[in-house]
């Protein structure tokens, strides 16, 4: 048996599902007529765990005698690392500098994932996405978050 991408995804699904079930039990499941706050995480976690286990079994059966599929093909390493770096930058910046600079960093770093992306399109895309975020969440829904780190 060779370890391939389907095995990794099966392990990821089963692990995340198991963690969701474990953490969701602390919230109280309730009953079927009056579900508690832990019902949704437990049920979705159980489904995710079952899907992960089924994917592991299917990948193991299907990989017998078959050629191995690379976990990350060489041409996909750059996009993977760019998206990972963009998410990491957003999570590290959001509390320090506010929402708009964090989203701008997310878009700018994520832009590096696409080799065909033209640099002159980046500012237009960033301004459009930032305008949509402000219109929907800040103005429309009135969610109180800091647009910039120095906002009140």
Image (cartoon, helix red, strand yellow):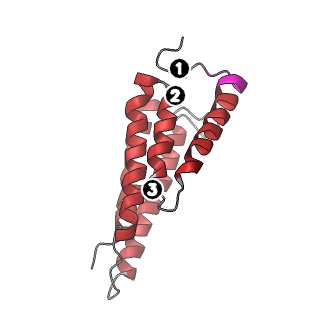
Instruction: Write down the quadrant of residue 95 in the picture.
Output: top left
In magenta segment, residue 139: yes
The residue where tag 3 is placed is: 113
Query: Is residue 68 or residue 114 the one in the foreground?
Result: 114
Q: CA distance from mark 3 to mark 1?
A: 28 Å
Label 3: how many Cα within 10 Å (few below 14, some 14–19, many 20+): some
> Secondary structure beneath disc 3?
loop
**Helix or strand or loop: what does disc 2 sit on?**
helix
Which residue position holds label 1?
Answer: 146
Q: Write down the region rendered in magenta.
A: 138-143
| Mark 1 neighbour class, 10 Å CA radius: few under 14, some 14 to 19, many 20 or more | some
Q: In the rendered structure, does residue 55 fall within the stretch colored magenta?
A: no
Identify the residue at horizontal 70%, vertical 29% (top origin): 135
**3D distance between C-alphas at marks 2 and 3:** 22 Å
**Closer mark to the observer between disc 2 and disc 3:** 3
**Foreground pick, 74 / 143:** 74
* C-alpha distance separating marks 1 and 2: 6 Å
Assess whether mark 1 and mark 3 are in contact (beta carbons under 8 angstroms).
no
- Location of residue 53 in the rendering, given as x and y in whole percent from the top left corner: 40, 64
User: Which disc is residue 99 wearing?
Assistant: 2
Is there any visible trace of residue 17 in the rendered image? Answer: no
Labels 1 and 2 touching (C-beta < 8 A) = yes
Instruction: Select label 3 or label 1 by which is in front.
Output: 3
Q: Quadrant of the C terminus?
A: top right
Name the residue located 47 percent from the left edge and 32 percent from the top edge: 102
**Extreme-front residue of the structure:** 120
- CB atoms of marks 2 and 3 within 8 Å: no
Residue 38: which numbered mark, if any? none
């Amino acid at each position: 048996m060779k370890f391939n991408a389907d095995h990794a995804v099966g392990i990821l699904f089963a692990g995340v599902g198991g963690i969701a079930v474990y953490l969701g039990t602390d919230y109280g499941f309730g009953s079927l007529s009056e579900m508690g706050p832990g019902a949704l995480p437990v049920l979705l976690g159980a489904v995710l765990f079952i899907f992960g286990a089924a994917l592991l079994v299917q990948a193991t059966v299907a990989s017998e005698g078959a050629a191995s599929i690379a976990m990350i093909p060489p041409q996909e390493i750059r996009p993977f690392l760019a998206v990972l770096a963009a998410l990491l930058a957003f999570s590290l910046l959001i509390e320090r500098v506010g929402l708009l600079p964090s989203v701008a960093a997310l878009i700018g770093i994520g832009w590096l994932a696409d080799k065909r992306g033209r640099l002159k399109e980046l500012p237009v895309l960033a301004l459009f996405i930032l305008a949509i975020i402000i219109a929907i969440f800040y103005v429309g829904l009135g969610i109180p978050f800091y647009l910039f780190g120095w906002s009140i």
